[in-house]
Image (cartoon, rainbow, N blue to C red):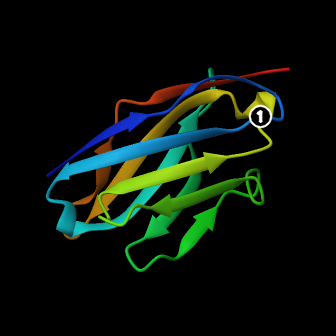
Amino acid sequence: QVQLVESGGGLVQAGGSLRLSCAASGSIFSIDVMGWYRQAPGKQRELVATILSGGSTNYADSVKGRFTISRGNAKNTVYLQMNSLKPEDTAVYYCNACLTGFGCNYWGQGTQVTVSS
């Protein structure tokens, strides 16, 4: 089992930057994939970015070139650097992990990101 705790959300003006962090604890050596998802009011949760244990990354088209996902040296932390933020990036951002043999149903509590115009 893995526990995920996010931090770093907040209020920022359009064009600004924020960095989200997610710290994993528990069976971190079983983590295959870590990622960020977001859910805006009235919308479904959507993929933002993922990073595999080998370092490969994947991004939603809407954030390519603006957001960067990375992992810490200890491999139990994942970051989301968000630049050139837009009002449409406003959402609750959730950290997610996929574990070998246990699936991808590991979520953090979420952190609010609000971008004002």
Is 85 located above or below residue 58 in the figure? above
- Which quarter of the figure has residue 45? top right
Q: Is residue 45 visible?
A: no
Question: Quarter-wise, where is residue 113 in the image?
Answer: top right
Q: Position of residue 38 (x, y in %)?
A: 56, 38
Q: Is residue 103 left or right of residue 10?
A: left
Give x and y (percent) for residue 92: 54, 28
Query: Residue visible at 82% across and 29% down?
Result: 14
User: How packed is label 1: few (under 14 Cα within 10 Å), some, or many (20 or more)?
Assistant: some
User: Quick one: quadrant of the C terminus?
Assistant: top right
Q: How many marks?
A: 1
Give the percent coordinates (x, y) of residue 60. 68, 56
**Residue 97, picture quadrant:** bottom left
Residue for point 83% across, 35% down? 15
Identify the residue under disc 1: 16
Q: Is residue 9 visible?
A: yes
Residue 80 image position (x, y, % from top left)? 55, 49
Residue at 48% x, 66% y is 51
Identity, as a three-letter code, of the amino acid under mark 1: Gly
Report the residue at 57% width, 42% height from top: 19
Q: Answer above or below: position of 91 versus 55.
A: above
Query: Which residue is at the far front?
Result: 73
Tell me: residue 4, above or below residue 59.
Answer: above
Mark 1 residue element:
loop
Q: Taking 57 as reference, is 88 above or below it?
A: above
